[in-house]
Image (spheres, helix red, strand yellow):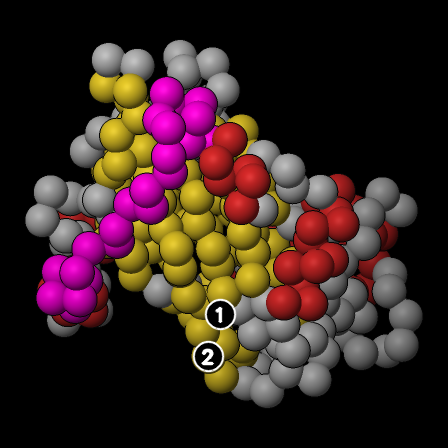
Amino acid sequence: MTAVFFCYAAAFGQDSAPAASPGNATDQEAAVEATTSDPAADPAQNGSEGGNLLWIQDATGSAGGVTTVKVLLTVDQDVYGAWLELIFDQSKLQIKPLAEDGVKLGADAGGLLELVLNDDFITLMNIEGKLVVAMVDTTLATPMTAGTGKELLIVKFAIDENAEIGDVPLTLSNVSFATVLDTIGVDIVVNTQDGNVTIAEFQKGDVSGDGNVNIFDLLDLLRVLGGSGSASGAVDVNGDGTTNIFDLLELLKVLAGK
């Protein structure tokens, strides 16, 4: 992975690859305090001075199910390259294969591309409990544009079936961002805010296994009944030992009662 990082630096015309500092402890504590003092506060509006903040959006899920985690960015400059590490508890969470969208760039990532990411690396990262992602705009023409609450990365985790109810921390580490000024790469100082996956008690009708019961569970169940898909949660909604139209009717009752 180190070699990839130096390639990424070279793409910006740099002779070396100084890591962008995520800010000193005082700045980072201030950023976290600003976003947690008010439970309803939006991190994108209450980040570090200058508005640069990378944070993990909290997610929920049930044991044996799947949860989707988003990494968001508020930045005041266009981003041409990024490096980040996401630390997780591998005994409770495992990144899904790339074919199942285990790791993919967010909707706002622009022309950034993931470097050297394949299922062999996913397997290794699941063993280590650390997702390492290097992203770069190889064309230097389609960066991730500056803005608030930009969706940078999406990670899909399978939750261990024996995971206990509670919060599983997700931590950002070794974060580095770069922009380009006059063809020269320049570091962007970005503070970070960690997040959690909350493993919730199983809910009746949670077909997707993400800890919520909503329209997505209905869509998943329809795909299962139609033979065109599978689900991570319990498809036997009415608990009679089979999956059929009666489970669909039961799920509709659950949704109508919400």
Q: Position of residue 133 (x, y in %)?
A: 52, 45
User: Which residue is denoted by mark 1 in the rendering?
Assistant: 197
In the visual, does 249 lie left or right of 104?
A: right
Q: What residue lies at 48% left-to-right and 59% top-to-bottom?
A: 86
- Does residue 213 appear left or right of residue 119 in this picture? left
The residue lying toward the viewer, choosing from 250 and 154, is 154
Q: Quadrant of residue 150?
A: top left
* Residue type at tag 2: Asp
Q: Residue at x 54, y 85 (%)?
A: 165
Q: Main secondary structure of the magenta part?
A: loop
Q: Please, is residue 54 above or below residue 238 in the view? A: above
Q: Secondary structure at mark 2?
A: strand
Q: Which residue is mark 2?
A: 167
**Residue 112 relative to residue 67: left or right:** left
Q: Earlier in the sequence, mark 1 or mark 2?
A: 2
In the depicted structure, whether residue 169 falls above or below residue 130: below
Percent of width and height locating residue 98: 71, 44
Residue at the image point whose x is 19% and y is 55% from the top: 23
Q: Which residues are magenta?
A: 8-29
Q: Are marks 1 and 2 in contact (CB under 8 Å)?
A: yes
Image position, residue 71 (x, y; %): 42, 50
